[in-house]
Image (tube, rainbow, N blue to C red):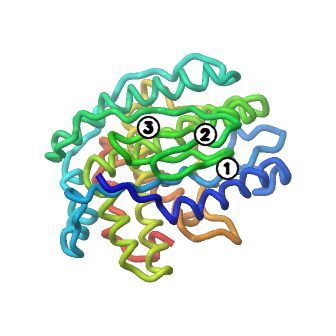
Amino acid sequence: MKLRVSKKLRGLVAVGAVAACAVLAVPNAQGAPTVAAAPTGALPPVPVQGQDGKVYDSGRDAWSSASAWNAVAKNRIYNTYAIPASKCKRPNVALNTEYRVRYFEQELVRCMSTVWKTNLWRSGAAKWNVTPALVVHGYNTVKSACGSVTGWISFYCSAGNGTIYIPWRQIVTYYADNPTYAVAYATNTIAHEYGHHVQHMAGILTASHWRQDHMSYEAGLQESRRRELQASCFGSAYIGSNKAYYPMTGGLKDMWDYVVSHSGDRPGYPRDHGSWTSHNFWSQAGFKGNGTYSHPGSCQTWSVPATKVA
Ligand SMILES: [Zn+2]
């Protein structure tokens, strides 16, 4: 396998590190939340959503423009119907230690794996039964096959069977400030990163990176937004499929609504994840599904005009 470190990831790492500083330096920079369950204190700005790194497999990822387009726009994952309810409850731990954050996120990975493999199998994906590894990292620089990262960065690296990286200290810090916000954020972040894993297993992730590498910078940013907004939509589709059991209702749902409507690109940073409006649109689309069930078909971000992925 030919490993290739993502230039994009390296670029975004610097962005993420700056954004993490901004979280500390400018509390409530995004303004007061408008949701009913909003706490009286300031919420931290929702940080840039997790990045994803790419690793090419020289055999499988020998894309052409036609095959890459088919992989992203006409993928069989879109026709796999309902994501089953995992029936997993929210892990009942306070998110106040590294150990507990790891437990919480590992449980969610396990729950997501049990149901996503159903849809991946239905799609005909060869690697439908693969659960990604989870790395919960703290202060130190973490080395991945997709590059090194430092700080409050969540990301997915597609090397091997895939690995999700989650910064526990960020979640512990949020928990001390607002536990409901921290739970909503921790839930949404791991769901988004698992969304990248689903993209990887379905052949979407590397096809999209291949496409981006064959585009102008600006067109490539739009490609990145389609990929990231889909990852959030897939993640939200999982959350929606299990909303009755988690449960994602009441104050936690209000806070999740806040998180997804305050996530995305910020002024001064690359337009690679989508605006808050776009992020909210695709997150809610995934969560609501077709009104009867949540399914990957709600997340066809390559089949819409550019205005929907602004
Ligand atoms: Zn992402």
195 to the left or right of 203: right
Quadrant position of residue 235: top left
Q: Give SS at disc 1.
A: loop
- Residue 90, which numbered label? none
Q: Residue at x 54, y 42 (%)?
A: 189
Q: Residue at x 52, y 47 (%)?
A: 155
Disc 2 and disc 1 in contact, CB within 8 angstroms: yes
Disc 3 and disc 2 in contact, CB within 8 angstroms: no
- Residue 185, which numbered label? 2
Residue at mark 1:
46
13 to the left or right of 85: right
Quadrant position of residue 115: top left
Query: Viewer-proximal residue, 123 or 64?
Result: 64
Determine the CA span between mark 3 and mark 2: 12 Å
60 to the left or right of 182: left
Q: Amino acid at mark 3?
A: Ile
Measuring from the top left, give residue 280's x and y in whole percent.
Answer: 53, 56
Quadrant position of residue 261: bottom right
Measuring from the top left, give residue 181's x and y in whole percent.
Answer: 67, 36
Residue at mark 3:
239
Query: Viewer-proximal residue, 275 or 137?
Result: 137
Q: Residue at x 45, y 57 (%)?
A: 282
259 to the left or right of 109: right
Q: Is residue 306 above or below residue 51?
A: below
First in residue order: circle 3 vs circle 2: 2
Q: From where the camera sits, is residue 90 visible?
A: yes
Mark count? 3
